Every structure is written in structure tokens, then in C-alpha cells.
Image (cartoon, coloured by chain):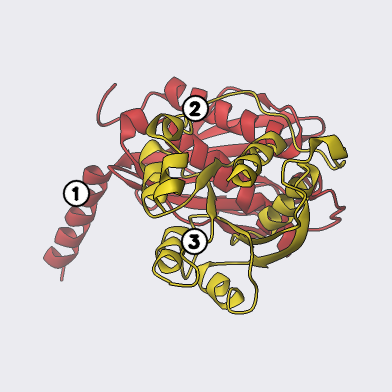
Chain colours: A red, B yellow
Amino acid sequence: MSKQELDVDFLADAMRAAALEVFGTMLGIEIEPSVPTPGVAVASEDHGVVSLLGLTGEWTGSGGLCCSAECACWIASQMLFSEYPEVNDEVRDAVGEITNMIVGNFKNSIGSVTGPIGMSTPTVICGHDMTTTNSGAHEWIVFPFTSQEHSFRMMVQLQPARQLASRAHDSIHHMLLNQ
Amino acid sequence: MASWKAALTLAEAASFSATDRKSRQALKPESRSADQLVTDQRNMNILIVDDSMALRKILQRVIRNAGVTVGQIQEAADGQLALQCLEQFKPDVILSDINMPNMDGLELLKKLKGSETLKNLPVIMISTEASRERVMESIELGACNFIRKPFSEDDIREKFGLLAKK
């Protein structure tokens, strides 16, 4: 496997295994994976929730979960055995923790290729018409999942840290030349 | 500390690796029957340290459902708050996450093992950070065991069962 690029099937297998295990164990729910798709920007539903984690190591980037507010409430309800008619702190916390577990197990699974990857604590955002992009214009790989009436997307963006550092160096060089 | 270290061998630690995909029983709301109690019937005081309120809530439920005879359970959202809590509360065991703001679980572990009064308190780490290196690092710092997230009632029962035997 290239040191500059990670195989999508390899990543999809790891994400599928992590998501299925977390939903099966923590929520008692079977989920169905669909075909992963690339995308520079990931748009959320009209009223949606995005949960993001920073990833750092020899490979660096982000991982996250994107779903509707309704789906976020459903995830929290299944996890905490309570009803949540709207997104509140408990729903955000539950979605953040689910993201943490899925992305955490995903990055552990791909560690044989990427080396150890550190992970930040999750940031969860709830709002309308949100789009998640990367400053480096590197593509997300989006992994759709469905269960019963609900669907959500896991997403990941990883690139070699050296490539990112080189890009930052080029940007600073460009800025200095234009001063 | 040496006995705690010996409790988890390198081979056992390796079994926590991310490639471990053993089938796990999904978490359920209902309680376990009395014949499945895993502790020595002594009420266990437990301190749960995790920055996720949802996870703390789930752990409380799973510990009770796993048949652990619970006395008092208290919660802290990070290592600093856990140390404050320990000024008043004397738990029999601490369950601590690793990735937390302010003071993470490994730093908490170092503080506990550096304290004359708290160094013998058993600490079970619970984290998605379950690489072999991270598990070994936790054990070397003095954790008595490690639970990988996501966890099942069986995982909790097994770890508390080991604790009770000691």
C-alpha cells in the first residue's frame, strides 16, 4: 500500500467493523453499510449534527459522524434508554462518545499501516445547512450507514503528516513572497 | 503494585488489540439475577472518571446489570475532579477513561501512584485507546486492568470478578 495514499477498501473494512461493533454492543442495533464515496465537502441535513475528532501521527487529519438532528436523538435514546425530542447536551454528549468509539477503533484497526495515531476529544456541532470541509482541500471519504428509519455517515480524511507540513511550508513561503 | 502488574500479562494485554473482534453481548437495560453476582457480596464503592456524561451513565447501568454489588458510585469528569473527589470519597476501585481534558487518565494514574494514601487503590482503565502499547503503558503506570470501549456486561463482569478474587 502506498505511503502517500490509503486504500479506500482497507479504510472501509476498518470503518465498517468499528461502526458495526459499536452500534451492536453499545446500542444493540444492527446497521447496514453502503458504498463509501469521496467528497471535498460533506453537507449535513437541513437540521443536522456533526461530531468531529482530530487525528494526529505519521498520518494526520480528522474523523467524524454526520447525521440529522432526529437521528442524533435516536442514537442518544437507544444508548441512554431515555426519550430525547430535541438535541440537547445529553444528545451531543452521546453522539460525541459514539463517534469517539467508532473513530477510535477505526484508527486502531488501521494502525498496522499508518502507525500509531493520536486522537483528540470530540467536538459536536448542531445547526442548519452546515458543510464540513478541510483547509487542505483533501477529500473526505464518506461511509454511509442505515438502520431502521435512520441513516448517518461516518467520514474520515487522512494524509501523511509530512505532506501536510510541506503544504504549510509552501503556504508560508508564498505569503512571505507576496508581502 | 507488582501484584497488579502481574495480574495482566503481556499476552493478555495483546488480546486487547484493535484486531480483537470477539463477539460481544449488546448492553441491555434489565438487571442480572443474583446467581450472577461477581463480587464477594461486599458493597463496592466505585469512582467513575470519564468526560462523557453518557458514558458515565452507561457504566453505572452496566456495572449494576453485571451483578456487581454496588455501594456508592460517584462520578468525575476528568482527572483533576477525580482527585478532588478522592479527598472526601474512599472508593474500592476507580474506573478511568484515558482521553480527557484538563488531566487525562494516565496523568491521574501517575498522581495516584505517587500518593502514599492512594497508591494501593485499584484502577481499571477504560478507553478506545486500546493499542498494545497503550495498554502496557497503563499497566506499567500501575493500572490493575484495562477495558476496551465498546464494552459489554461480560467485559465488566470479568474485570470486577478478577478484582474480587484479589
Q: Is residue B72 visible?
A: yes
Residue drawn at the location 47% of the way across and 40% of the way down: B7
| Quadrant the N terminus of chain B occupies | bottom left
Q: Is residue B54 above or below residue B30?
A: below
Q: Exactly how many numbered labels are in the figure?
A: 3
Tell me whether circle 2 and circle 1 mark residues in contact (CB < 8 Å).
no
Q: Mark number for residue B120?
A: 3
Q: Secondary structure at mark 2?
A: helix
The residue type indicated by label 1 comes to Ser
Please tell me which residue lies in front, A109 or A73: A109
For the residues labelled 3 and 1, say whether their Cβ atoms are less than 8 Å apart.
no
Q: Which residue is under mark 2?
A: A14
Q: Nearer the viewer, residue A103 or B135?
A: B135
- Relative height, residue A83 to residue A12 (above, below): below
Q: Which mark is residue A166?
A: 1
Report the mark closest to the observer, 3 or 2: 3
Which of the marked residues, 2 or 1, is nearer the chain's N terminus?
2
Residue B2 placement, left or right of A26: left
Callout 1 secondary element = helix
Q: Residues within 10 Å of mark 1 (few under 14, many from 20)?
A: few
Q: x, y (%) of residue A27?
A: 74, 38
* Front tag of 3 and 1: 3
Q: Which mark is residue A92?
A: none
